Amino acid sequence: MLILVTGGSGSGKSAFAEQKAVSLAAGGELVYLATMQVYGEEGKKKVERHRQLRRGKGFETIERPVRVDRAEPGEDATVLLECMSNLMANEMFSPDPPEEKEGGEEAWRRILRQIEALYSKCRHLVIVTGEVFSDGAAYEEGTLDYIRQLGEVNCRLGRKAEEVWEVVYGIPLSLKKGGEQEKIRQICRQNCEMQEDQA
């Protein structure tokens, strides 16, 4: 199962994603795929806080700030990837870019290929990502490109995922679960057709 969990900074999305991963693993192999490159004291504090959250839950940690497809979880493993926002920044701005960057391909395409390869190696994949495009602020060109590419990855992963959750103020909201999304699309199509008939 592929699950995408999104939300703003400090929303509780990480804690919720951990609960989902632990539940899916049901006592089986549980992998925490850490993508954060740690810089400074603030970064160290954040890593330590996340370690405290995971303590006693059975996670094995694999650090992969780039090339998540090179992680080797077991085929029955549940993998929690934390988080897509860091992975995108690392792929785009790392001083030691992966070799594919030389070909000029956009980061979002490389990341999607890597996610597909990673997902093929495990049973369940839970991905944490950040909410973008909702603050309405103006940014410089490099940041706008990062936001655009992260938004592209989020949209495409949202379409592929069996479940999509947004965590708002610690409250998880189901945006897509199982066949619910197709039912919503059918209702929307029916409503559009009815409006066209009435016009």
Image: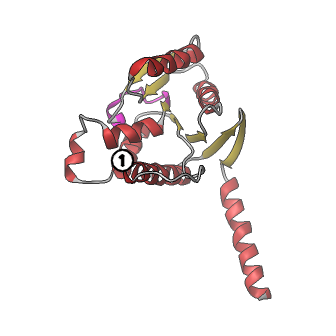
Is 75 drawn above or below residue 162 in the view shown? above
The residue lying at 70 percent from left, 45 percent from top is 174
Q: Nearer the viewer, residue 114 or 150?
A: 150
Q: Name the image quarter holding the C terminus.
A: bottom right
Q: Which residue bears the numbered disc 1?
A: 113
Location of residue 164 by image quarter: top right
Q: Does the magenta run of residues contain 69?
A: yes
The residue lying at 47 percent from left, 23 percent from top is 31
Q: Residue furthest right?
A: 198
Number of numbered markers: 1
Is 89 drawn above or below residue 189 in the view shown? above
Looking at the rendered structure, the kind of residue marked 1 is: Arg
Q: Does the magenta run of residues contain 110?
A: no
Q: Position of residue 89 (x, y in %)?
A: 39, 40
Q: Position of residue 184 (x, y in %)?
A: 71, 61
* Side of 144 where 199 appears, left or right: right
* Element carrying mark 1: helix
The residue lying at 43 percent from left, 35 percent from top is 86
Q: Position of residue 99 (x, y in %)?
A: 21, 41
Q: Nearer the viewer, residue 84 or 174?
A: 84
The residue lying at 39 percent from left, 23 percent from top is 38
Q: Position of residue 116 (x, y in %)?
A: 40, 45
Residue neighbourhood size for the residue with mark 1, other residues' Cα within 10 Å, grouped as few (<14), some (14–19), many (≥20): some
Q: Name the image quarter holding the N terminus.
A: top right
* Range of magenta residues: 68-80
> What colour scheme was applied to this rendering of the protein?
secondary structure
Is 52 drawn above or below residue 17 in the view shown? above
